Image (cartoon, rainbow, N blue to C red):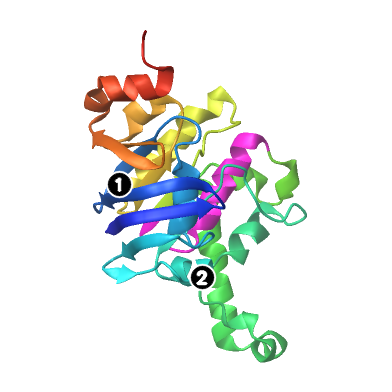
Amino acid sequence: MLEISGVTRRFGGVQALSGVDLTISPGGITGMIGPNGAGKTTLFNCISGILPISGGEIRFLGQRIDGLRPDQISRRGLVRTFQIARGFPRLTVLESLLLYGADQPGESLAAALIRTRASIRREEALVEKACKLAERLKLSHVLGNKASDLSGGQKKLLEIGRAMMRDPQMLLLDEPMAGVNPSLIRDIGDRLISIAEDGVTIVLIEHQMDLIARLCQHVIVLADGRRMIEGTFDAVAGNTEVQNAYMGARR
């Protein structure tokens, strides 16, 4: 589904990605782990079009996407979230979800002024979809609240909800549990399992190894801007090179 071949990314004299090669197959949740500075978020930024690559190729569903704008990549069904939940703090939860709905004829000036039947029907459909997503993500009770008033965990759920409004085929989630109250972490994990069961392929960056072990069928380890190893969580966790990358080699 996603093919990354020899991808490099330089920041001046710093080589953040040094020829990353990996593939993501359709279905399930794939974990991406590695020590700080391994290049995980940089790789997500390159895949999603936020950063141009310095070399290599990125293909999604068989088509090259490196060089495309983020909005063009999103329209193809590959959507990402960020470590720090972003959005418009003065919008309500419902408005935030509606903003990300695709195919909105009312966005054109003429349709917005005339209020055509097509734009009204589409708006009604998006409202229904947003309300169902909010219910699924346990945000129904805060639909009228401003995004700035949400807790850290609720903001993360809203970020996931906004991404789901795009009807993605693949979700790149960058530390969706960071800064979340421990009481909400399991709930967010359950929501991700449910989304994956509906056929959305998820790639997850996360530092909490217990979550990776619980959620991910396949784990990829990055270190020094390269893919070090991949496999099941048990196989990866028991690998000496992985242990050294996280904790340093024993002298």
Q: CA distance from mark 1 to mark 2?
A: 29 Å
Three-letter code, disc 1:
Glu
Residue count near mark 2 (Cα–Cα under 10 Å), binned few <14, some 14–19, many ≥20? some
Label for residue 197? 1
Front residue of 35/176: it is 35
In the depicted structure, whether residue 165 falls above or below residue 213: below
Closer to us: 246 or 224: 224
Q: Residue at x 35, y 61 (%)?
A: 56
Provide residue 154's location: percent of width, then percent of height. 61, 40
**Image coords of residue 121 (percent x, y):** 54, 79
Taking 240 as reference, is 101 left or right?
right
Instruction: Evaluate whether residue 88 shows in this view.
Output: yes
**Magenta-highlighted residues:** 151-170
Farthest front residue in view: 13
Q: Which residue is mark 2?
A: 69
Q: Residue at x 24, y 52 (%)?
A: 25
